[in-house]
Image (cartoon, rainbow, N blue to C red):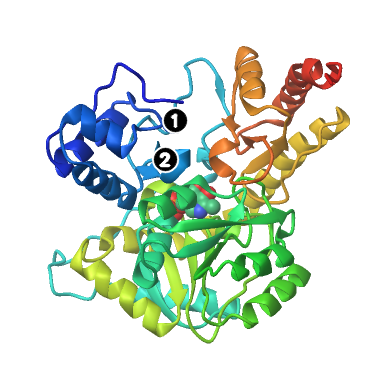
Amino acid sequence: MNVPVHYRIAGASASEIAASIEAGVRASRLTPGARVPTVRELARRLRVSPATVAAAYQRLRARGLLAGQGRRGTRITHRPPLPTRSPLDVPAGLRNLADGNPDPRQLPPLPSLPRERLPRLYGRGAQLPELVDRARRQFAADGIGGDVAVVSGGLDGIERVLAAELGPGDRVAVEDPGFTGVLDLLLALGLVAEPVRIDDEGPLPGDLERAFGTGVSAFVVTPRAQNPTGAAIGEKRARELRSVLDRRPDVLVVEDDHAGPVSGAPVTTLCPRPERWAVIRSVSKSLGPDLRLAVLAGDPALVARVEGRQRLGMGWVSHVLQRSVVALWDDRRVTERFTVAASHYDGRRRALVEALERRGIAAHGRSGLNVWVPVPEEAAAVTALAERGWAVRAGEPYRLRTPPAIRVTVSTLKPSEAERFAADLAASLRPARSAPTVR
Ligand SMILES: Cc1ncc(COP(=O)(O)O)c(C=O)c1O
């Protein structure tokens, strides 16, 4: 793909040229994957020196907007860190199985908080001791010690840990397929993703070992409710992975336990480790994404760095949110509902996986909110399903080297709908599957 002719990159200095390209990406006039002109070509066109254009491209590369260079050309990255489109472009009228959300009916109402006698001011403790105390006890019950920090959600925790320990150009082992948020974040931080294939039991130990051979500095892993495949690490796989990790104590391990008690799989962990580890537990799926809160356990040096940096920017996670989580965790009616929610999601995943199986379609969904269905062609499957009234996510943003699939969020999918969905997917795959082989 070449630069669309209707977008003219402009500018007389490196910063103007970089700003012009960034504006083109933001306005979706330079699309992900598009090739930008060579340094010489653009320099000639803009009547500036090649060094000026090279400096502009270097700036954009560092920001994660451009990738590659040399003979294969420099391109707009597939996931530039800009809001190029709304994350949820579900056309009106389609049944939305695309958004990865929990079922709102499985989330508790916000608690009413007792009024504080005095408003909170600057200069007080960042963490609410009651929250840290409860988090520490929950981690300890799973054999996880370390220090505890409070962050603004799972992805915020991952970002803070990676930013505290790594620098641009560092390689990070990630699940393939894996959560788009993490893949996009790596690009935005100038980090390089090294894919590790997974099965229903989590990352493949041999693949992790191979990734370590490429010089990775960190490994981001989802122990359960893996997004998009639903993989959950069992005890045996955890032992195998630990033995690979034990040989590399220098590698930072970041565990993203984003669905926690509603994931539908028991806790397994590859942590704690002697150093360089963090386990992040978000409340987004169990209490609601709008609480924007996660608790993070990690080795003391790492937690201190995360907290130190946090204080310079946002300062602390609002005590309104911290107190809300404490109130919800202290309410037995809320915590007892976690088991109900977990089995609700379990039932929804099973209904879809079994309905697909009856039609000869293999799918994955051991835990979590999504089912991952390998298909021969993603775009064709997504379009055919949309014609039949369903919105699902194409697998492409989740994949690095693994084959095509679609992601179906099942949190609100009733079993009767699962049957209809499976029949529609089977019908839409049929022509592609029965087409004669072209030699
Ligand atoms: C695997 C995974 N990690 C992290 C997150 C983000 O969670 P949070 O809302 O806590 O940032 C998500 C959101 O769906 C997710 O699927």
Q: Residue at x 53, y 74 (%)?
A: 138
Outermost residue, bottom direction?
A: 274
Mark found first going from the N terminus, 2 or 1: 2
- Camera sees residue 10: no
Quarter of the image that includes the C terminus: top right
The location of residue 289, given as percent across then percent down, is 43, 48
Name which residue type carries label 2.
Thr
Closest to the camera, between mark 2 and mark 1, is 2
Where 13 sits versus 123, above or below?
A: above
Instruction: Name the residue beneath numbered marker 2.
Output: 77
Q: How many residues crowd around disc 2 within 10 Å: few (fewer than 14), some, or many (20 or more)? A: many
Secondary structure of the residue carrying tag 2 is loop
Name which residue type carries label 1.
Leu
Instruction: Please indicate whether residue 380 sits to the left or right of residue 107 in the image.
Output: right
Mark drawn on residue 88: 1
The answer to which of 163 and 140 lies nearer the viewer is 163
User: Which of the 4 image quadrants contains residue 29?
Assistant: top left
Where 412 sits versus 114, above or below?
A: above
Where 426 sits versus 206, above or below?
A: above
Instruction: Please indicate whether residue 431 sits to the left or right of residue 319 in the image.
Output: right
Instruction: Please indicate whether residue 123 sits to the left or right of residue 71 in the image.
Output: left
The answer to which of 262 and 188 lies nearer the viewer is 188
The answer to which of 180 and 32 lies nearer the viewer is 32
Q: Residue at x 53, y 68 (%)?
A: 216
Where 231 sits versus 216, above or below?
A: above
Q: How many residues crowd around disc 1 within 10 Å: few (fewer than 14), some, or many (20 or more)? A: few
The location of residue 128, given as percent across then percent down, is 31, 72
